[in-house]
Structure formats: C-alpha cells, structure tokens
Image (tube, rainbow, N blue to C red):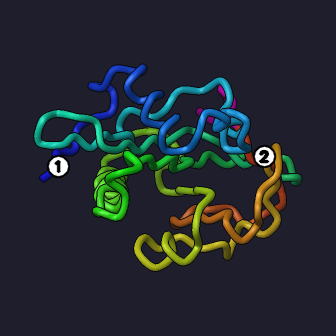
Amino acid sequence: MIALVPLASIAPPAIDSLLDRAFGLDRRGRTAYRIRAGISALDELSFAALGKEGELLGTIQCWPVELACDNGKAFPLVMVGPVAVEPDRQQEGIGRALMDRMLDAVPGCSSRGCDSLMLVGDPEYYGRFFGFTAERTAEWRLPGPFESHRLLARGPRVPDCAGLLGPRSPRTA
C-alpha cells in the first residue's frame, strides 16, 4: 500500500536522490531540463508516493511552461514529468498511481495552462492509459534534441501551431 502526498512535504535532497537513481546522474543535461529552466514545479500538481514505512518510492512533478508560437502568440501549458519511481519498485503501478493522482487534481488547478498538459514520453503508454497524443505537437520545437513522436499533449486548449517550447514567461504566468 502506498500513500500519495503533496511533493512539497518531501525534503528536496530526497527527491533529487530518487531522480538520480531513476534517471542517472547525467539527467540534468536532458532537453526536459532546458524546457523548465529557471522555474519551480507547480505544487498543486506535484506528488510523492510513500511506502508503508514512509519511504519515498516515487514522485511526479509538473511545471509551468509555454509554447511561443511563430505567429507571436504564447500559450501556457503544464509540462508533466519527470515521473520517477525507485528502480527496484518499478512495474508495481506506482508511476500510474502518481499520474492518476495528478490528473485527478487538474480540474481544481488554479494555474494557467492546467487544461493543456504536455510531456515527453512513451506514446503507447501515455496514449493508452492517459489520453496523450502527438496530434498537435508536430510543429513544436524544443531547446535540445528530442524524438518528435514522443512529444505528447492532451487537453482542450493544446495549441496546434509551430513554435518553441520553454519556461513560462511572466507575461503568461
């Protein structure tokens, strides 16, 4: 049995340690870190999974980002991830429980862009279980290398334009 709690209740060093174990020590060089550079995660959509002894088993973080379209418009979005699970506890449904908890929190989310979620991930998994697709992301650019079929989004206001994804600017926060 796991307990899902707000990520803000977990010490940042414990979160970093889990992320290092789940994604490797080189994780900060990934494109996702460039997208969310200089911003803080959204507390209302970020959660932790704790085991029965209170040990940290997994985390999900969500970030305020924006798509700066080439036509001059900017659209606020929420970037989902990373979804990190303790390596020896993967395949136990912890990541799925974290995603479900985050999606359950979306309707009450007060941040702009909560109706437009995006992530970089496995299209078969995130499409099948959570409704993410690459239908509107084909012309999005990221500040680093990525596989375009893994750039996914869901929500009624996901923009369908060519543009650059990055941290949310103060004007669209």
> Residue 84 at what x, y percent from top left?
44, 46
The question of residue 170 being in magenta is answered with yes
Q: Is residue 62 left or right of residue 30?
A: left
Q: Is residue 56 left or right of residue 54?
A: right
Quadrant housing residue 136: bottom right
Residue found at the very far front of the displayed protein: 88
> Residue 135 at what x, y percent from top left?
67, 76
Q: Could you say which is closer to the camera, residue 74 or residue 11? A: 11
> Residue 112 at what x, y percent from top left?
51, 42
Q: Mark 2 or 1 closer to N-term?
A: 1
Q: Is residue 171 left or right of residue 123?
A: right
The question of residue 42 being in magenta is answered with no
Which contiguous range is marked in magenta? 167-173
Residue 172 versus residue 121 in the image, above or below: above
Residue 41, can we see it? yes
Nearer to us of marks 2 and 1 is 1
Residue 39 versus residue 4 in the image, above or below: above
Residue type of the residue flagged with mark 1? Ile
Residue 168, can we see it? no
- Check disc 2 and report the residue beneath it: 68
Residue found at the very far right of the displayed protein: 70
**Main secondary structure type of the part rendered in magenta:** loop
Q: Could you say which is closer to the camera, residue 78 or residue 8? A: 8
Give the numbered dot on residue 2: 1
